[in-house]
Image (tube, rainbow, N blue to C red):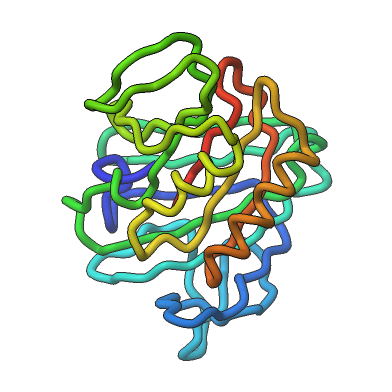
Amino acid sequence: MGPPFLMPGETIIDIAATNCRVRPQKAGSTGKLAYGKDFVWPLAPLTRGGTVDLTTVPANQASLDLAACQIDPNKENGYITAVRPDKHLIFGYVFRREEYPWVMSWMNYTGDARADAPQCILVLVVREAVRYATLGGRKVKSGQTIALGPDDVLIAANRDREKCVLEAVATLKPGFELITLFYGDGAGLAETEGMARRIGSTMPGIDVEVRHGGQPYYRYLISAE
């Protein structure tokens, strides 16, 4: 979720969460929350002292914070919602707590309602080429692993799957702090964890996570935030 729905000072965020922890501090971090501190949703500790209510999207503030939050163990289902009272609109997710007992609250706020949300999250698609083709002036052979960026722009192609993925993530511009590998059709957990370790070794300072996406057709979806 991002602008224009997440309007500074207008949107209310809620999570069926209880215990949370702010991420550890990293070089270049720009967060306002106290790093590594535990709190109970939604009142989080600030580095300058005091607390802040995380249900409110802040106006005229720029910050990037992450917090891991436990879904209320007394609830069968968890939820994450964003409400725009001025528009009488609500958007959210409902899910089984036993499947997702923890969630990550990623709070990248610019304080500008015109912020370009697609620059905050970038998704790359990794799949197998099923025929010979030319994409963006580059020839692709059947059986190659290919990585596609926004607007299906070809950014990597290689017979070696690992080299293709590493070539794709190497094209990411500086500023991303978290890469998530969602593995789907044809991929397994052990393979994906190995891929995540190799990405982490080539991109120090960036967190790499693995999630089961279960998506058909696409071996990996790579989310960069």
Task: Classify 59 as above or below 113.
Answer: below
Quarter location, residue 57: bottom left
> Residue 73: horizontal and vertical position, in percent?
82, 47
* Vertical order, 50 against 154 (above or below): below
Q: Residue at x 77, y 45 (%)?
A: 101
User: Number of callouts in the render?
Assistant: 0
Return the residue found at the far bottom: 48
Q: Answer left or right for 155 relative to 96.
A: left
Q: Is residue 148 left or right of residue 110?
A: right
Q: What residue is rendered at 46% in x and 29% in y? A: 146
Q: Which residue lies furthest to the top in this view?
A: 131
Residue shown at the point (70%, 34%) measured from the top left: 212
Q: Nearer the viewer, residue 158 or 51?
A: 158
Quadrant location of the N terminus in the rendered image:
top left
The x and y percentages for residue 14 are 53, 48
Q: Which of 77 and 137 is in front in this view?
A: 137
Relative to 187, does residue 189 appear above or below in the rendering? below
Left/right placement of residue 206 relative to residue 212 reads: left
Q: Position of residue 76 (x, y in %)?
A: 79, 34
**Which residue is depicted at the point 73% across and 54% down?**
70
The x and y percentages for residue 118 are: 29, 43
| Residue 197 lies in quadrant | bottom right
